[in-house]
Image (cartoon, rainbow, N blue to C red):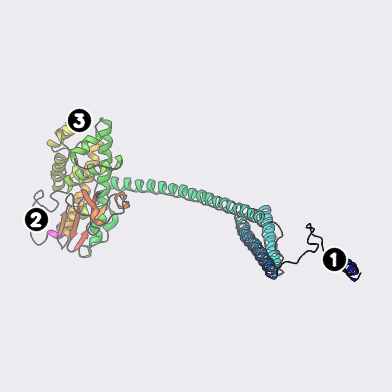
């Protein structure tokens, strides 16, 4: 009996616990309770949760830092773009004042004010940590566009300024050209008067004891101007006679290549000066003078020759020292074949053989050149120091002490003095005691 009643009490107690505790039912009928997980498994799940929480926190912080950096980069880009815009506006304001343009000044001034206001707003927002809420990539793109616009505006302002300067320089150049033409016209008129009167007034008040190398240089330039005029006339007659100028130049200087066709006249000028100055120190062509008074007599001749015209000298005494000098130089300078080719006959040479002087423009230019060279020779003989002539040999290294180049083209090559060689001498140099009067040379740059 007792054995039968015990199970009944146990069932009632079990039901009571089931009603009090919320246990889950298992799908297995033999185990009506839901067992708890072991202790070490609970610890593993807790660590995983903490690790996930830490990783999420780091990812959030990194994303926050990246966004802050991008916003700051965009802010700085916008700041520099605004500064560039301010510079362009200020440059535009300056450009609008010269020449003055009221409307352009007002617009540029407003642009400066707007940019300054923008910078002020950016400063305020930076200190309040209120950065532009726009997406950073949009701000960067707008800043780049603003920067490019400012650069374009600066280029436009600079271009307009340079165009104005070019116009100003062109006006100055035109004015200088006009002044140069007027000066050339005046010089030609003075030269014509001097040629017609035969007067050389530079040394009128200079005595024999006052002579200096500077006086010699003045008279040398006076003589060389007539050489240049004669060479121009000679080249013109050669062209009119259908000469091959290049072939004629190659006969004079066969191994020289000229960078410009106009430089070929220097070869012809070198031929003329070589013939006119040969024997410059010799007195074989003149009547011997008494010793002791030679300097005074040569100086008197100089003063007389510089104040008379060529026609007066020829008419006064065709067989004078100057007449002999002019006749001999013409025979050396103008070859019979050359005269026949230029003028179709030898009438000028035949006239000279009778000690008369042809009345032609060519011979007039020649005798004027001869007179001035003779004047220079008389002055050289009047110096108390020996006056010597020197000619630079072909291929010599260029020296600024003894030489002067007739062109500046060779000096733009960028080489040292070893790369500059003399092609030929155009005008010989002179030495007056220890003083050197530079020779005029045509310089060629050698290739290495």
Q: Residues within 10 Å of mark 3 (few under 14, many from 20)?
A: some
- At mark 2, the secondary structure is loop
Note whether residue 209 is visible.
yes
State the residue position of label 3. Answer: 341
Q: Quadrant of residue 399?
A: bottom left
Gap in Å between the C-alphas at discs 2 and 3? 41 Å
Q: CA distance from mark 1 to mark 3?
A: 142 Å
- Magenta stretch: give its range: 291-298
* Circle 1 Cα neighbour tier, 10 Å, few/some/many (<14 / 14–19 / ≥20): few
The residue lying toward the viewer, choosing from 185 and 354, is: 185
- Counting residues from the start of the chain, the first of labels 1 and 3 encountered is 1
> Which label sits on residue 22?
1
- The structure residue drawn at horizontal position 17% and vertical position 63%, both measured from the top left corner, is 433
Relative to 204, 72 lies left or right: right
Q: Which residue bears the numbered disc 2? A: 289
Query: Residue 294 location, x and y as percent?
Result: 12, 59
Earlier sequence position, callout 1 versus callout 2: 1
Frontmost residue, 40 versus 331: 40
In the image, residue 391 lies at what x, y percent? Answer: 17, 52
Kindly report which numbered mark, 1 or 3, lies closer to the viewer in this rendering: 1
> Where 112 sits versus 440, above or below?
below
The residue at 8%/53% (across/down) is: 288
Magenta span contains residue 247: no
Q: Position of residue 160 (x, y in %)?
A: 56, 50
């Amino acid at each position: 009996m007792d054995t039968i009643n015990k199970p009944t009490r146990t069932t009632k107690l079990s039901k009571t616990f089931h009603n009090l505790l919320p246990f889950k039912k298992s799908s297995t009928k033999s185990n009506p309770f839901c067992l708890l997980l072991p202790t070490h498994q609970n610890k593993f799940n807790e660590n995983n949760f903490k690790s996930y929480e830490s990783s999420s926190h780091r990812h959030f912080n990194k994303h926050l830092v990246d966004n802050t950096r991008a916003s700051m980069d965009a802010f700085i880009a916008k700041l520099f773009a605004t500064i560039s815009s301010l510079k362009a506006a200020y440059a535009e304001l300056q450009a609008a004042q010269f020449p003055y343009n009221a409307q352009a000044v007002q617009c540029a001034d407003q642009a400066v004010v707007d940019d300054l206001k923008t910078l002020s707003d950016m400063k305020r927002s930076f200190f309040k940590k209120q950065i532009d809420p726009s997406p950073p990539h949009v701000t960067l793109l707008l800043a780049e566009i603003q920067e490019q616009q400012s650069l374009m505006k600066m280029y436009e302002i600079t271009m307009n300024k340079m165009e104005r300067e070019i116009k100003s320089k062109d006006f100055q150049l035109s004015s200088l050209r006009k002044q140069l033409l007027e000066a050339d016209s005046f010089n030609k008129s003075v030269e014509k008067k001097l040629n017609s009167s035969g007067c050389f007034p530079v040394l009128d008040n200079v005595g024999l004891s006052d002579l200096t190398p500077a006086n010699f240089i003045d008279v040398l330039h006076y003589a060389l101007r007539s050489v240049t005029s004669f060479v121009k006339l000679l080249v013109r007659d050669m062209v009119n006679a259908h000469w091959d100028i290049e072939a004629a130049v190659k006969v004079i200087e066969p191994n020289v290549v000229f960078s410009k066709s106009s430089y070929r006249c220097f070869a012809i000028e070198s031929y003329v000066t070589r013939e006119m100055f040969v024997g410059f120190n010799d007195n074989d062509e003149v009547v011997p003078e008494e010793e002791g008074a030679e300097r005074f007599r040569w100086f008197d001749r100089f003063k007389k020759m510089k104040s008379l015209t060529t026609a007066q000298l020829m008419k006064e005494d065709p067989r004078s020292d100057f007449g002999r000098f002019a006749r001999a130089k013409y025979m050396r300078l103008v070859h019979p074949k050359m005269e026949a080719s230029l003028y179709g006959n030898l009438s000028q040479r035949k006239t000279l053989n009778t000690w008369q002087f042809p009345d032609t423009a060519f011979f007039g230019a020649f005798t004027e050149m001869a007179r001035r060279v003779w004047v220079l020779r008389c002055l050289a003989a009047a110096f108390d120091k020996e006056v010597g002539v020197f000619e630079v040999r072909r291929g010599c290294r260029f020296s600024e002490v003894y030489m002067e180049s007739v062109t500046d083209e060779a000096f733009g090559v960028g080489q040292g003095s070893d790369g500059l060689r003399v092609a030929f001498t155009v005008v010989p140099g002179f030495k007056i005691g220890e003083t050197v009067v530079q020779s005029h040379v045509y310089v060629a740059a050698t290739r290495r």
